[in-house]
Amino acid sequence: MGAISASEAAPRPKVCDHRSVGIDIVGPSGERLMLQRVKPPVGRAPGAGHVDDHGSPEDAARAETFEELGLTVIRLRRLAGGWKPNRCRREVRSGCAVGHLWIIYRADVTGDINPGADEARNVAWHSPDQVRDLARRTIHRARGWIKDEEFARDPGLEPVWVDWYTQLGVINGVAEADLNRVRALYA
């Protein structure tokens, strides 16, 4: 038997494509479907993921919704988009900036929630008040009032989603100084 080459010994880490989609699923009373990812980043968030080889951002939104939540998208509406300097667990090519060009969609879905075990856990609907409380918890972490270990045990919103939900008007009244602290968490 021959020696194992370095490329055979360990799988190569995925390289970031710097394109992400977020999928905001809203119930009839304004509640939002959120999950905790099995892998970092820590926090509660809507379904999201890289565009990668899914094709278009719309194709990625459909695929990520099915992979993470087991739901089928029947309609997508673009809500927002833009660059956020949020880190991910993937390798970044030399010379590329850390971050993602995001497109956020509102999705109408069908089917029964069936989270992918390797993708999501603690999938639940969160009322508008609960979303605000989760954002407040993340802001408290950004202020240094909550330690990382405590946040991991009982997370708030993923920091990038505090930013998106502020931009979308889902949460209001976040002071600019606090928003900048939250941005520092994800940058």
Image (tube, rainbow, N blue to C red):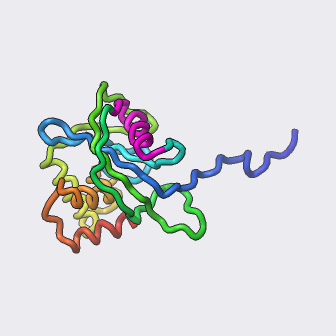
Q: Position of residue 55 (x, y in %)?
A: 50, 43
Question: Does the magenta stretch mainly form a helix, a strand or a loop?
Answer: helix
- Is 57 a magenta residue? yes
Please identify the quadrant where the N terminus is shown: top right
Q: Is residue 112 above or below residue 21?
A: above
In the image, the segment drawn in magenta is: 56-73
Q: Residue 114: which quarter of the image?
A: top left
Q: Residue 177: which quarter of the image?
A: bottom left
Q: Residue 176: which quarter of the image?
A: bottom left
In the depicted view, which residue is nearer to us: 20 or 36?
20
Q: Give the residue at x 14% y 60%.
A: 172
Q: Position of residue 174 (x, y in %)?
A: 17, 65
Q: Give the residue at x 25% y 68%.
A: 179
Q: Position of residue 25 (x, y in %)?
A: 26, 40
In the image, taking residue 78 as reference, residue 58 lies left or right, namely right
In the depicted view, which residue is nearer to us: 180 or 155?
180
In the image, taking residue 58 as reference, residue 130 lies left or right, namely left
